[in-house]
Amino acid sequence: MGRYVVRRLLQMIPVFVGATLLIFLMVNVMGDPIAGLCGERQCDPATAARLEREFGLDEPVWQQYLTYMGNVFTGDFGTAFNGQEVTELMSTAFPVTIRLTLIAILFEIVIGVALGVVTGLRRGRPVDTGVLLITLVVISVPTFVTGLLLQLLLGVKWGWIRPSVSSEATFDELVLPGLVLASVSLAYVTRLTRTSIAENRRSDYVRTAVAKGLPRHRVVVRHLLRNSLIPVVTFIGADIGFLMGGAIVTERIFNIHGVGYQLYQGILRQNTQTVVGFVTVLVLVFLVANLVVDLLYAVLDPRIRYA
Amino acid sequence: MLLEVRDLHVEFHTRDGVAQAVNGVSYGVEAGETLAVLGESGSGKSVTAQAVMGILDMPPGRITGGEVVFRGRDLLRLKEDERRRIRGAEMAMIFQDALSSLNPVLSVGDQLGEMFTVHRGMSRKDARAKAVELMDRVRIPAARERVRQYPHQFSGGMRQRIMIAMALALEPALIIADEPTTALDVTVQAQVMELLAELQREYRMGLILITHDLGVVADVADRIAVMYAGRIVESAPVHDIYKAPAHPYTRGLLDSIPRLDQKGRELYAIKGLPPNLMHIPPGCAFHPRCPLARDVCRTHEPPLYEVSGTRGSACHFWTECLNG
């Protein structure tokens, strides 16, 4: 197990380098980083040259990349062109997005798994058909539609919640945005759990559990659910990365100043340092989430042992 | 009588129609007695056992008639919660394929201990100690260390021993073993069967042994019930049946056993196929495959004729069959 973890950690290095290099190159190709600095006007050539020298932009790209990575590992993600440290942006943006992601994951696990169990056990009945239909709708409708609709109904029309989130972005403010962010994944978790439960329900070990005279809830939770959750855990684990980076739409709708918002602003203003910095961290989040999922496999299914 | 099944009927409702899986089965088991239930796949032997245990999938299954009297109570009239308390504690079941019948993600100690925590309210620690004791009981070496292991870490024979230990845990009065040795290597089959028979004698349990292996039956069974198309066609003490079967189907089964003195000759097989349970032939269900069949067999279903005080045969011509 220990050796497996070490091997996996080592495998992360090339993935990390490759992914960050790709972003670095793409952002460089994207446009002239100096252009954003002089506002609407074109910079005059002398100022542009001075700025390029100051930021090291006259060096070759690979040199720039190495310098950047070197700085990243000392905790320096550089400075945005407006003079704000990127790490400072991160320290305000990431806690908000982590809170949002936590709420979304919680929704996925609690509601998604519960609905999956209920429908899996009652396959073909009205509850099952109804829930299945709803999940189909949720999956088909884009998040910005669901988000705006809920914001309009709950926030503006009925006034149950504040339509936009304050700069503190506390947990209770993030409940609705969290639900919106989770919605599509939640529908997938429901379907995944449902299929898995329905498949394992007729298995021999469930019949054994019944023959042992165990109460129904114990048969379902301890024997059936434990086995059915393996594919669901994989999905949720991989989803953590997506939720953290992919909250751009949700964060825009509810005016949440999280990672998605900062990334969006960074791309809009051609703020190279911000974009590369945030994406670098997101790559790390993805890698770690994937490792945790693989390790969870072994916990959930003892037949999988890593040598 | 420890268990008495009376005139049990079970149907399965499927998309293609209604399958008549069990059609009026009656049998009984005394404490300490072994009843072997013989028959081909689809003869209803497992379905009857599942109805007795109360683990039949309903739907699609449906019990349409009969009684299952266990220690004086008709189980079919009990509430589900009362039945659950009997399952595992007073009657237990051993399944054919131990690998798929044990939960792959729980340690064998957890699965054995569960019997004690759920039915007896023991602490997890005491239950674990009991699990080790049980594994010792079924002669699994190094039980103390292996109690933490998972089913896939055991060999086929050891896994079936764990199934036996689990069934035995609460010392039930009745054990139903559904082809307990079919999935095992021949060399291991005898060991597992011996162990089961020995523990049965020790605890004086009733044992229903469902099998299609006539070799196993001869060694351990007291009585035999032969099933065909959801009915019992012959029921008799084991020696009587081996001496002279009173039903042509039983005769066919016995003749199908390969024998050394017939080496080189073609093996005997009962001609034809088992009936489709959605369209069981009228009259005697066996008549399309029966060498003795006459007109009456096509129109009249034979009752279970009394051959002797302890023996019955559902054949119009049982005397003919018995004599040869």
Image: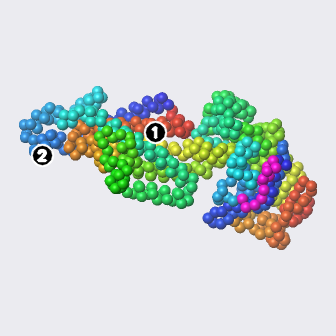
Location of residue A153 with respect to B18 vertically, above or below: above
Q: Residue at x 10, y 44 (%)?
A: A42
Q: Which residues are magenta?
A: B63-74
Q: Which residue is mark 2?
A: A40
Mark 1 crowdedness (10 Å alpha carbons): few <14, some 14-19, many ≥20? some
- How far from the left and from the top, in percent, is residue A168? 31, 39
- How far from the left and from the top, in percent, is residue B7? 80, 59
Mark 2 crowdedness (10 Å alpha carbons): few <14, some 14-19, many ≥20? few
Answer whether residue B72 is magenta in the image. yes
Badge 1 marks a residue whose secondary structure is helix
Left/right placement of residue B114 relative to residue B22 reads left
Q: Amino acid at mark 1?
A: Val
- How far from the left and from the top, in percent, is residue A240? 40, 42
A213 or B134: nearer the viewer: A213
Image quadrant of residue A157?
bottom left
Looking at the image, the residue that sits furthest to the top is: A74
